[in-house]
Image (cartoon, coloured by chain):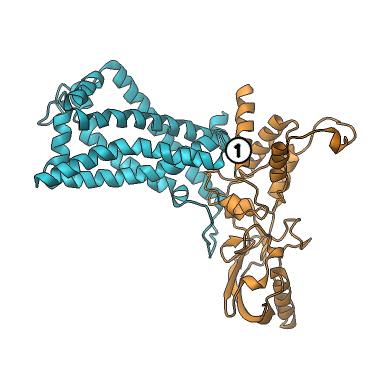
Chain colours: A cyan, B orange
Amino acid sequence: MWLKDSSIGRKFVMSISGLALVFFLLFHGCMNLAVVFSEEAYNTICRLLGANWYALVGTLGLAFLVLVHFSYAIYLTIQNRAARGNDRYAVTGKKEGVEWESENMLVLGIIVIGFLVLHLYNFWFRMQLAEITHGATAGAFDPQDGASYVIALFTTPVSGQIYCVLYLIWLCALWFHLRHGVWSALHTIGWNNLVWMKRIKVIGVIVASLAVAPFAIVVLYYLGMGIAML
Amino acid sequence: MDQYIDIKVRVWRQAGPKAQGHFETYDLKHVFQGASFLEMIDILNEQLVAEHKDPVTYDHDCREGICGMCSMYVNGHPHGPDSAITTCQLHMRKFHDGETITVEPWRSRAFPVIKDLMVDRGAYDKIMQAGGFVSVNTGGVPDANAIPIPKPVADEAMDAASCIGCGACAAACKNGSLALLPQGKIEAAARAKAMVAKMDELGFGNCTNTGACAAECPKSVSLANIARLNREFLCAKFQD
């Protein structure tokens, strides 16, 4: 199977799974942004998704994509370390035009996955899983009233501000990961040439910023609100 | 204005493919900055021979930047700290008096060390042999002016064709990858599949588009060739 056995096939799988996850982030971020403008609109979205069959299918699809993307990343890294060999260069000079994030994608990815576990606990566990289990994992909150939960999580004195800072660190790591990941994925699937080289990098920065900005706006909005309440 | 400088050369010494390598540092005095880097190594070897020591083994041939033989990692860069040149085109004016210069062989599983700075770059030959030919008799060479080629196409072809197969791309890549693999147009699909299969078989890594290959390429072959190869390979695989 060339998608597993060929180096370009493996990179193709990484690219397609990564791009699909970026599309999900854009979708997810737009929904999150609603909470800043209208709590009612956000709760409507929560009810629309919740534990409905299409949301559950989507969640399983996402879990599969994350699993594929992460397991391929580990597999590729192991192969790449073997290809480099055991002998390292005694002196390594800085290579012009080589971005820091492009050489640290696995580290950034592990940070993203680490915070994802926290995020799943904060939201998926308290909302979608709570609906599936008829409130068993909801804690003191109503899974249908997502807006109140978001506000409480991010504005409760001290713990809310700590969560905001943690989420902002996560979003920084995600932005750097996507800044390389988006253009690299497009490049790997062959959408690049001498003319588009610079343009595609700009597209990567724009898409990375669009994917991360809605999440950051929500966190910063409630960080400001929480600090004002102190 | 070029001057005479005193330097220390820290060279990787390895007696053979299976031997344990190590660095040795040699003092070299009164080196003219107008000398090329390889001439400096020659001066060092003359000094070592005079001291009844084993001279440093290294690859070299044309000494005009077109053969790709002079594979050396100098101060953390393939072909040294200057851009878009081979080691034979590197001059000692890039170094200052009292400097310690570290010289290493390519370090990649696909390039095993034969001795000192000389590595086996036969992997590139095997990849070229796997697909680098046209399988039918195409007759005599047609007159170049009889085939109108658009300028952008000619530029793109020249960008890829300027590769000298020196190995700096894979040597500089943190993944030990050879994705910067120029492809000819004739029978491109079959060639891309055969050459990528051979590349994988020889143990090169998976490209993550860091751009180190293009940054260190002595011929400035563009990173766009990776996308071009991938496009050709993916189209060929989906058509199978």
Where is residue B52? Give x, y as percent: 73, 81
Tell me the subunit letter for badge 1: A
The residue at the point 64 percent across, 36 percent down is B197
Q: Quadrant of the C terminus of chain B?
A: top right
Q: Residue at x 64, y 56 (%)?
A: B112
Asked if A104 appears above or below B152 in the picture, the reply is: below
Quadrant in the picture for residue A56: top left
Give the amino acid type for the residue marked by disc 1 in the picture.
Answer: Asn
Q: Residue at x 64, y 42 (%)?
A: B199
Q: Secondary structure at mark 1?
A: loop
Please provide percent x and percent y for residue B236. Answer: 64, 27
Q: Nearer the viewer, residue B95 or B29?
A: B95
Tell me, yes or no, if residue A73 can be seen here. Answer: no
Q: Residues within 10 Å of mark 1 (few under 14, many from 20)?
A: some
**Residue at the far top in the pictured view:** A53
Q: Position of residue B35 (x, y in %)?
A: 72, 73
Coordinates of residue A86 in the picture (x, y in percent): 53, 56
Q: Is residue B4 above or below residue A225?
A: below
Is B7 above or below relative to B224? below
Identify the residue shown where x is 73% and y is 39%. Answer: B154
Q: Is residue B165 visible?
A: yes
Residue to which mark 1 is pinned:
A193
Q: Nearer the viewer, residue A118 or A40?
A: A40
For residue B5, which quarter of the picture?
A: bottom right
Position of residue A7 relative to residue A63, above or below, is: below
Q: Tell me which corner region of the image, top left, top right, bottom left or bottom right, holds residue A55.
A: top left
User: In terms of depth relative to the viewer, which is nearer, B156 or B198?
Assistant: B156
